[in-house]
Image (cartoon, helix red, strand yellow):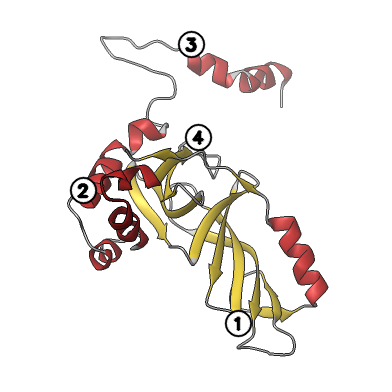
Amino acid sequence: MPEDFEKIYESKMSIIENMTATNGGVFTFGAGTKGEDLYADTLSSFIGLLKDGTDASKLEEMGFAPDYYAIVSENGDDGLSKIGYAYMDINNDGIDELFIGDMESGVAYDIFTMVDRTPTHVVSGGARDRYYIYEGSFICNEYSGGANESGWTVYNLEPNSTDLVVQWGYKYDGYESEDKPWFQTYDLNEWTSITEDEYKEALEQTNSYTDFGFKPLS
C-alpha cells in the first residue's frame, strides 16, 4: 500500500482514541466493547436466579450449568463467592466475552458473546464438561464420560456469532476400541486412530491454559 496510507492504518487506534463528539454527543473510546458495559444485565439476572434458589433442572432448562445449584446449596449465604465471572476477548474482534464458572477449580461452565449487539449464550457445560482458554485465542472443552471415555476439543469462536469451529480434538474411547482407544479428529465427524504416545504428546502440548482471573459473583 502507499506509504502515507500505511502510516495512517498503523496509527488508526491512536486516531480513534483522540476523537471527540460533536453536536452535544458523547464519545468514549472503548465503550460498547468491554464486559462491564455489555453483560451487567446478564449477570444481574443470573445472580437473581441463584438468590431465588432456582433448582438445577430449572437452571439447565434456562441454558445454565446445573452445577451452580449444588455450589450455592452447599455453601449457603457464601454460595455466590464460590461462583466466578470474567471478561475476555477470546476471538480478537475487540469485544469481550463473558465466562462464568467455578471459583475453586478455575474452569468455565458457561460462555456468552455479543451477537448483533445482544448478549447471547454460546455454550453451557459442567463439572464433567469444562471450558478453558487455550493460547489466549481458543476455547478448549475437556469432557469425561467415565473411566472409559474422555477427551478435549479446541474451538475458534466466530465473531458476532455463537458458532464454535473445531480446530482439532483428541479422545480416549474404550467403548470404541479396547485395544486402541486413542483417537484424533479435525471435525468431530471423522476420528483417526493414533498411538498412545501420540495421544500423550498432544495432551502435554494442549494442557496449558490461560487463567480466567475469576471475580466472585458476590
Which image quarter: residue 78? Answer: top left
The answer to whether residue 146 is above or below residue 200 is below
Q: Verify CB contact (< 8 Å) between mark 1 and mark 2.
A: no
Q: Nearer the viewer, mark 2 or mark 4?
A: 2
Which numbered disc, 2 or 4, marks the residue that appears first in the sequence? 2
Which numbered disc, 2 or 3, marks the residue that appears first in the sequence? 3
**Front residue (pair 132, 6):** 132
The tag on residue 18 is 3
Cα distance in 3D space between marks 2 and 3:
43 Å
The tag on residue 94 is 4
Q: Verify CB contact (< 8 Å) between mark 1 and mark 4.
A: no
Residue 10 place in picture, x, y as percent? 65, 22
Residue 208 place in picture, x, y as percent? 68, 51
**Residue flagged by tag 2: what amino acid is it?**
Lys
Q: Which residue is mark 1?
A: 148
Q: Is residue 103 left or right of residue 180?
A: left
Which numbered disc, 1 or 4, marks the residue that appears first in the sequence? 4
Q: Quadrant of the N terminus?
A: top right
Q: Is residue 201 left or right of residue 30?
A: right
Cα distance in 3D space between marks 4 and 3:
18 Å
**Residue flagged by tag 3: what amino acid is it?**
Asn
Residue ID at (33%, 39%): 39
- Dot 1 falls on a residue whose secondary structure is loop
Residue ID at (30%, 53%): 72
**Residue flagged by tag 4: what amino acid is it?**
Gly
Q: Quadrant of the C terminus?
A: top left
Residue ID at (30%, 36%): 40
Q: Verify CB contact (< 8 Å) between mark 2 and mark 3.
A: no
Cα distance in 3D space between marks 1 and 2:
37 Å
Q: Which residue is mark 2?
A: 51
- Dot 3 falls on a residue whose secondary structure is loop
Residue 46 place in picture, x, y as percent? 27, 48
